[in-house]
Every structure is written in structure tokens, then in C-alpha cells.
């Protein structure tokens, strides 16, 4: 039955409906009524819903922890990767595009990146983040396992690249680093390399590829037999990496 | 409080949000990052207010933006303003989570005790349009009587039905309904400049 007039009862139902506070049964009945195309009720329900939709904006803003942003971006990165997994692998040499990648280039880049990630370093097993369906799982597990304390190592840009930054989430139980960094684009033929720095040695932890925005991430297993770790450092090295770091250090953080 | 000029400004800013959501729908990850940067504190504030548990709120926050990423293509401008869309997703995810955890959360603090959570002001890089909106919505809520505001906020933040609200407040159902109606009419009127801005 269509309504001719805005009655109080009708307004009440529409207002409570807009707040989601009708019982299930009442809400279903009201929705059925709206489907019968009652312009009076539809107008009321719509305008009350719009008003109700704004209520949440009145809350006090609260800051979530910074690592949630990294987690979110790695999660959607994984979904983007899965969506593009049907694109055939291009028959090309392992050169990375140096220009800003277009959508197609980006997929090529992705594929090349995956191929490049299959390199296994002596001291650590590495997963390049674009390859990694594991990255998200790892982060999820680390996040949810309260028994697995996370230690944060903040990486700060050094003189060579002051705007660089990054976070290392150290799962001390599994002895694993999840590394998320932002670095300036490397010159052609160069790549970033992460190092475990101990009191008496610098040991390669793996190569870090960055995307067009300079963001990169890897998971690194920390060797157990290593001496006391003092810091993590990132240097710029020739493609393929080096056995010992080439100075200067681009980003560094104390453990 | 609503001059036509206000409406035009809200409308112009809504266009920016709509453009951002459109880019997210096209799979642009930097657009999602930008949307997150501009809105995460308000969304987290809402989710935390509903759940009052930080670690659950963090999980829900991730779920909210993951849902935005997956469903941005479904966003329909005609059915609501972009920020309201985002806040509605956040509210439903948080209330769903709250309901699913209610059984083992019998000892949850009462809603009245939640005012003391540590808050943070919006960061400078956050869209100023957002803080303006926050002010406007708060001002609009302040036009309501204490009783009207109480029933509306209980419904919004706790997901209780009107009869549950009546029970909780120890008031007759009819009273709760009347307060809801009168409060929502006032709220709608006070928010007119923002709501017309979406047209």
C-alpha cells in the first residue's frame, strides 16, 4: 500500500531503518514496502540513510599503527599479482624497464621481477615481494600470533639518500625479518642490497627490488649461527649483488 | 548553517573523493594508498569506538580497506556520498565483528565509558575537507537533545535494535521510537549543506 502522506509512524520506521535498528522481521517488511515503489517512504528512507551515513564522521580520530599501511599494501599487492597471473611470460632478457612502467609494462616488470627473485643468496632465503603469496601469509601469521613478539627496526635514510625510509618487522620467534622500504630509483644496472651487520662482519641478506614508487619488500630468514646483530643496512650494488657492501650506506637501522 | 555556497564546496570536494574511488576501482594501488592516508584515522576512530579493542580494530581496519579495494567498482555515486560509503563499510564490518565476538565479550565496557580513549588530531596531510565535515557532523549532533542523541548513537555504534535500546535504557519502546524520529529529523536538517552537496 502506497502512502499519500508523511505520517509520524512512517517517518519513525524510516528513521529507525536508516540506523539499522529495526528488527530483522520489520526491516524485511519495510524493504518489501519500498520495493512496491512508495515514493513517500523512499524519499524518507533515502534522506535519513544519508544523514545516518555521516554520523561516524563525528568520532575522534585515532591513529592506527604505521605497519598497518604496509600490511594493507602488501595484501592488495598480492591480489593484484593474482589477477595478473594469466599474462604470458615475455621472451625477453632480464632487464628491468627503466622508464615509468605502463600497465602492460608493469606486468612484464612483475614477471621479470619474479624470475629475478628466484636467485637464492648464500646466507638467506629470499622472497621478492611481488612473487610472494607467502609475504601476506607471513605478515598475517606474525600479526595474529600473540606468542610471536614483533620487534621493529626503523630504517633511516643516510646522507646518500636522506629521504629513504623503511621498517623491518623482526619475528624473533621464527627468526625472520619482513622488510618494507622506500628508496630512490636505482640507476640502471644497480640494485639495492640488504645487509646483516654484526660486530665483526657484514653478511648479505638479499637484494631489494623497488617498484615505480620506490617501494620494495622482502622476507629474510636471519641465520641463527650469526654473531650478535648490531644493525641492518642497505647499500647500492651492481645488478646481482655483491659479496661485501659498497659504501656509502643508503639506509640503516639499529637492531 | 547551510548556505548554497557550502553545498557547492562539498559537492566539488566529493568529486575528488569520487575520482579517487574510481582510480581504486581501476586497480590503482597508489589511489588506495592515498585514500588510506587521507581517511585511516577517522575510519580507525570509528572502528575503535565500536569495538573498543585495539587489536581487533586493527584487523577490521585492514578488512575495511581490503573491501574498498575489491568493491570500489560497485560504488554508486547516486546512492550516497563517497565518505559516507566508506564509513558505512567500516561500521558494518566493525558491528559484524562486534556481534561475532559478543558471546565472549560479556564483560565489555559500557558505551558510556568509552570517552576516554586516547585520541589524535588529524594530521596536516589529511584532507582538510574531512576535518570540516567532522566539525559539521559534530555540530549537527549537538543540535539534538541529550536523549535523542543517546538513542541514535546507541543504534549507530552498538548495532542494537530499537527494542534492545529500550531495554537497555529502561524506557518504553514508544519513547525510543519518538526520540529516534525527532532526532533523525533534526540531524537531517542540520546536515543539509553536506547532503545537498552530493547532488
Image (cartoon, rainbow, N blue to C red):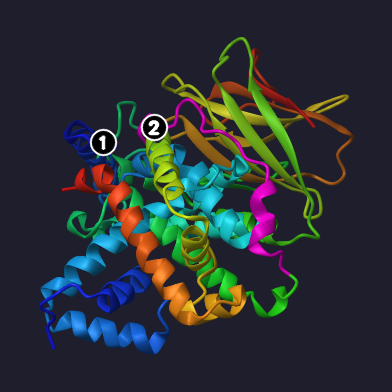
Q: Position of residue A202 (x, y in %)?
A: 77, 26
| Badge 1 vs badge 2, beta-carbon distance below 8 Å | yes
Q: Residue at x 31, y 47 (%)?
A: B191
How many numbered marks does the figure carry? 2
Residue B69 appears in the picture as rendered: no
Q: Residue at x 61, y 31 (%)?
A: A166
Q: For residue B118: magenta?
A: yes
| Pointer 2 residue | B127
Q: Residues within 10 Å of mark 1 (few under 14, many from 20)?
A: some
In terms of secondary structure, where does tag 2 sit? loop
Specify the subunit that label 2 lies on.
B
Q: Position of residue A47 (x, y in %)?
A: 24, 60
A226 or A78: which is nearer to us?
A78
In terms of secondary structure, where does tag 1 sit? helix
Image quarter for residue A23? bottom left
Q: Residue at x 80, y 49 (%)?
A: A172
Q: Please give left or right for residue A17 compared with residue B114 in the image.
A: left
Residue reaching furthest to the top: A159
Which quarter of the rendering shows the C terminus of chain A? top right
Task: Say above or below: B102 vs A47.
Answer: below
Q: Residue at x 29, y 88 (%)?
A: A29
Mark 1 to mark 2 CA distance (whole Å): 10 Å
Bounds of the magenta segment: B108-129
| Pointer 1 residue | B13
B21 or A181: which is nearer to us?
B21
Q: Are marks 1 and 2 on the same chain?
A: yes
Task: Say above or below: A246 vs B123.
Answer: above
Q: Residues within 10 Å of mark 2 (few under 14, many from 20)?
A: some
**Which is more N-terminal, label 2 or label 1?**
1
Which quarter of the rendering shows the N terminus of chain A? bottom left
Amino acid at each position: 500500500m502506497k502512502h499519500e502522506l508523511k505520517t509520524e509512524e512512517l517517518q519513525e520506521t524510516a528513521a529507525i531503518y536508516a540506523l539499522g535498528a529495526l528488527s530483522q522481521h520489520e526491516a524485511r517488511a519495510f524493504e518489501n514496502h519500498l520495493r512496491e515503489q512508495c515514493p513517500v517512504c523512499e524519499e524518507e528512507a533515502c534522506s535519513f540513510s544519508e544523514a545516518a551515513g555521516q554520523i561516524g564522521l563525528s568520532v575522534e580520530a585515532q591513529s592506527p599503527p604505521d605497519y598497518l599501511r604496509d600490511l594493507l599494501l602488501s595484501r592488495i599487492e598480492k591480489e593484484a599479482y593474482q589477477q595478473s597471473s594469466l599474462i604470458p611470460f615475455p621472451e625477453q632478457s632480464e632487464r628491468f624497464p627503466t622508464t615509468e612502467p605502463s600497465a602492460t609494462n608493469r606486468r612484464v616488470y612483475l614477471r621479470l621481477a619474479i624470475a629475478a627473485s628466484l636467485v637464492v643468496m648464500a646466507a638467506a632465503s629470499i622472497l621478492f615481494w611481488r612473487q610472494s603469496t607467502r609475504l601476506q601469509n607471513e605478515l598475517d601469521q606474525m600479526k595474529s600470533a600473540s606468542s610471536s613478539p614483533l620487534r621493529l627496526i626503523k630504517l633511516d635514510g643516510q646522507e646518500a639518500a636522506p629521504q629513504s625510509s623503511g621498517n623491518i618487522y623482526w619475528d624473533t620467534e621464527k627468526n625472520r625479518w619482513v622488510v618494507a622500504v622506500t628508496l630512490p630509483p636505482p640507476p640502471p644496472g644497480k640494485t639495492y642490497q640488504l645487509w646483516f651487520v654484526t660486530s665483526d662482519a657484514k653478511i648479505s641478506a638479499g637484494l631489494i627490488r623497488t617498484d615505480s614508487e620506490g617501494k620494495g619488500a622482502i622476507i629474510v630468514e636471519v641465520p641463527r649461527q650469526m654473531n650478535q646483530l648490531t644493525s641492518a643496512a642497505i647499500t647500492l650494488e651492481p645488478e646481482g649483488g655483491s659479496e661485501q657492501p659498497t659504501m656509502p650506506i643508503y639506509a640503516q637501522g639499529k637492531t | 548553517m547551510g548556505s548554497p555556497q557550502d553545498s557547492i564546496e562539498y559537492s566539488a570536494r566529493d568529486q575528488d573523493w569520487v575520482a579517487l574511488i574510481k582510480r581504486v576501482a581501476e586497480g590503482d594501488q597508489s589511489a588506495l594508498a592515498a585514500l588510506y592516508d587521507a581517511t585511516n584515522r577517522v575510519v580507525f576512530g570509528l572502528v575503535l569506538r565500536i569495538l573498543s579493542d585495539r587489536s581487533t580494530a586493527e584487523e577490521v581496519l585492514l578488512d575495511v580497506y581490503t573491501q574498498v579495494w575489491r568493491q570500489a567498482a560497485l560504488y554508486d555515486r547516486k546512492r550516497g556520498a563517497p565518505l559516507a560509503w566508506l564509513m558505512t563499510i567500516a561500521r558494518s564490518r566493525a558491528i559484524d565483528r562486534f556481534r561475532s565476538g559478543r558471546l565472549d565479550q560479556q564483560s565489555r565496557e559500557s558505551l558510556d565509558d568509552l570517552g576516554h580513549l586516547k585520541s589524535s588530531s588529524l594530521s596536516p596531510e589529511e584532507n582538510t575537507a574531512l576535518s570540516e565535515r567532522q566539525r559539521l557532523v559534530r555540530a549537527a549532533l549537538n543540535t539534538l537533545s541529550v536523549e535523542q542523541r543517546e538513542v541514535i548513537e546507541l543504534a549507530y555504534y552498538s548495532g542494537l535494535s530499537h527494542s534492545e535500546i529500550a531495554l537497555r535504557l529502561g524506557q518504553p519502546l514508544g519513547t525510543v521510537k519518538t526520540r529516534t524520529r525527532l532526532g533523525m529529523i533534526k540531524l537531517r536538517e542540520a546536515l543539509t549543506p553536506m547532503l545537498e552537496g552530493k547532488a
